[in-house]
Image (cartoon, rainbow, N blue to C red):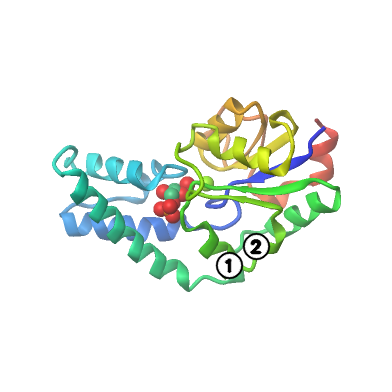
Amino acid sequence: PIKAAIFDLDGVIVDTAKYHYMAWRRLAEELGFVFTEKDNERLKGVSRMRSLEILLEVGGLADRFTAEEMAAMAARKNEWYVQYISGMDESEILEGAVECLAGFRALGVKTVLGSASKNAMLILNNLRLVPYFDVIIDGTRVTKAKPDPEVFLLGAKEAGVKPEECVVFEDAQAGIDAAKSAGMKAVAIGRPDELHGYDRIFRGLYEVKPREILEQD
Ligand code: G6P
Ligand code: MG
C-alpha cells in the first residue's frame, strides 16, 4: 500500500520555471548569446551547476571557464533568481496542489517534498506551504542530483516508509527516472509526448484524486 506521497516542487507545486528562465536568459545575454525558452526545457529538474554547463554548451562556450568562474556565474544567476522568487505569494501555487497535499494527508498518507532546489524553503515559506509537509528534502540535503534516487530515498527514510510504499509526482524526466530507480511509483505531471517511463500521467495535480491513486495501487 502507498504510505507516502513525494512531491517535486518546481513544475509540480509551483511554476518557478519562468523565473529560472529569466535568470538564465539574463546570464546568457551578459555572455553574448540568446538562450531560448526551448533551450530552457533542458534545465528542468537539473541541478544548478549542470544547468550552467548546458547553458554554456548552448552558447558554444563549453570548457571555456575555470571552476571558479563557473561558480561565480552560478551564484550570480541565483542572486537574480532569488530576487524574482522573493515576490512570489500563494497566488502562484499551481491549481490543485493544496487539495492534493491535504487529500493525501486526510487518507493517512505522509506528504514529502523531494526537490533538487536549494531555494525550496524560501519558496515554501513565501507560499505558506511548509505546514502541508511531513518531511522536506531539498537541494541542501542531497549530494547527488536526479536522476539519482538519493533525494527520494532520503524522503522515504525520513517518512519511515519503504521505497515501494511511495508514489512520486514529477514533471521532469530526470525525476521520473529517479523515482523508478528508487523502486517507487512514478506519476508524471505533463504531456505524454514529452515524458516516458512513468506509471500514470496527468496534466496537473488538479487532475489527481488521492483516493484513486491509493486504490489503483
Ligand atoms: C529544480 C528545477 C531546476 C533547478 C534545480 C536547482 O530541479 O527544476 O530547474 O535548476 O531545481 O534549483 P536551485 O534553486 O537550487 O538553483
Ligand atoms: Mg520539477
User: Which sits in the foreground, 52 or 44?
Assistant: 52
Image quadrant in which you'd find residue 166: top right
Image quadrant in which you'd find residue 28: bottom left
The residue where tag 2 is placed is 130
- Which quadrant is the N terminus positioned in? top right
- In the rendered image, residue 107, in percent from the top left (x then y), is placed at 86, 48
- In the rendered image, residue 114, in percent from the top left (x then y), is placed at 59, 45
Q: Is the residue under label 1 in contact with that under label 2 (CB below 8 Å)?
A: yes
Horizontal side of 132 relative to 122 (left or right) equals: right
Identify which amino acid the numbered label 2 is placed on.
Val
Residue, x 73% and y 40% (percent of image)?
160
Horizontal side of 34 relative to 44 (left or right) equals: left
- In the rendered image, residue 102, in percent from the top left (x then y), is placed at 78, 57
Is residue 63 placed above or below 8 in the rendered structure?
above
Is residue 158 placed above or below 162 in the rendered structure?
below
Is the CB–ligand 1 distance for label 1 below 8 Å? no
Q: Which mark is residue 125?
A: 1
Residue, x 74% and y 46% (percent of image)?
208
Q: What element carries label 2?
A: helix
Circle 1 packing at 10 Å, graded few (<14), some (14-19), many (20+), is some
Residue, x 58% and y 34% (percent of image)?
192
